[in-house]
Image (cartoon, helix red, strand yellow):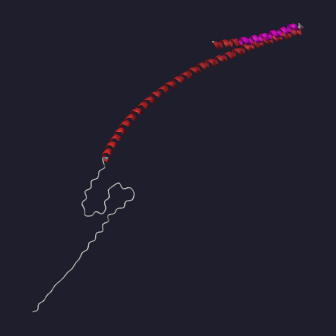
């Protein structure tokens, strides 16, 4: 009897290789979290800043408040400075006006003194001219007597008298000028 027989065989194989490394290399400072060698896991990780963000927020608010107060104080200082500058400018204007007024009055008085000095010099010159004319006339008279034969003692007396009159005339002129200057 013959029959037929058949058989089939199939063989299959799958190999999966997963390489996992449990090492981590970090260069420089590492202040965070690093996980190594974890696969197909559910990791629940909770991190805390230990209140750093809250402190940073409060610090920022305090800095803002401080800045606001500093601006208000600065505004007050600037206002006071502007008031001081304004008052100083008023004082400078007043001082300048007073200085110009004083200078003007000094110039007027100096003009009067200068005119008085000029008048005094003219007066002195006129008196000196008169004294010189008198001395020349006296000398001419003395010369005329000398030629007419009068004594030598008379000529000497006339010369002395001329000199004395010249000195007296000069002293009178100086006295008049000093008296006018004193008044």
Q: In the image shown, does 168 or 111 lie closer to the viewer?
A: 168
Relative to 94, does residue 172 appear above or below in the rendering? Answer: above
Q: Quadrant of residue 183?
A: top right
- In x, y percent, where is residue 125? 72, 16
In the picture as drawn, the residue positioned furthest to the left comes out as 1
Relative side of 58 to 107, left or right: left
In the picture as drawn, the residue positioned furthest to the front comes out as 22
Query: In this picture, which residue range is highlighted in magenta?
Result: 152-173
Would you say residue 153 sits in the magenta stretch?
A: yes
In the picture as drawn, the residue positioned furthest to the right comes out as 149
- In x, y percent, where is residue 179? 66, 11
Q: Quadrant of residue 73?
A: top left
State the quadrant of the N terminus. bottom left
Residue drawn 80% across and 10% down? Answer: 162
Residue drawn 67% across and 13% down? Answer: 178
- In x, y percent, where is residue 173? 71, 12
Relative side of 135 to 13, left or right: right
Relative to 16, does residue 45 appear above or below in the rendering? Answer: above
Residue drawn 44% across and 29% down? Answer: 84
Q: Quadrant of residue 35?
A: bottom left
- Report the magenta stretch's main SS: helix
- In x, y percent, where is residue 135? 79, 12
């Amino acid at each position: 009897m013959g029959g037929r027989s058949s058989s089939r065989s199939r063989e299959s194989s799958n190999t999966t290789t997963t390489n996992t490394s449990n090492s981590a290399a970090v260069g420089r400072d590492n202040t965070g979290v690093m996980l190594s060698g974890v696969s197909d896991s559910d990791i629940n990780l909770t991190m805390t800043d230990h209140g750093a963000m809250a402190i940073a927020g409060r610090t920022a608010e305090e800095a803002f408040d401080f800045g606001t107060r500093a601006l208000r104080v600065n505004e007050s200082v600037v206002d006071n400075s502007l008031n001081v500058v304004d008052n100083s400018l008023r004082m400078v204007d007043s001082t300048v006006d007073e200085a110009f007024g004083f200078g003007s009055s000094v110039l007027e008085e100096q003009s009067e003194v200068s005119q008085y000095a000029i008048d005094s010099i003219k007066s002195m010159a006129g008196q000196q001219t008169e004294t010189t004319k008198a001395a020349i006339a006296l000398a001419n008279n003395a010369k005329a007597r000398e030629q007419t034969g009068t004594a030598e003692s008379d000529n000497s007396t006339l010369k002395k008298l001329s000199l004395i009159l010249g000195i007296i005339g000069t002293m009178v002129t100086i006295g008049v000028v000093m008296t006018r200057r004193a008044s």
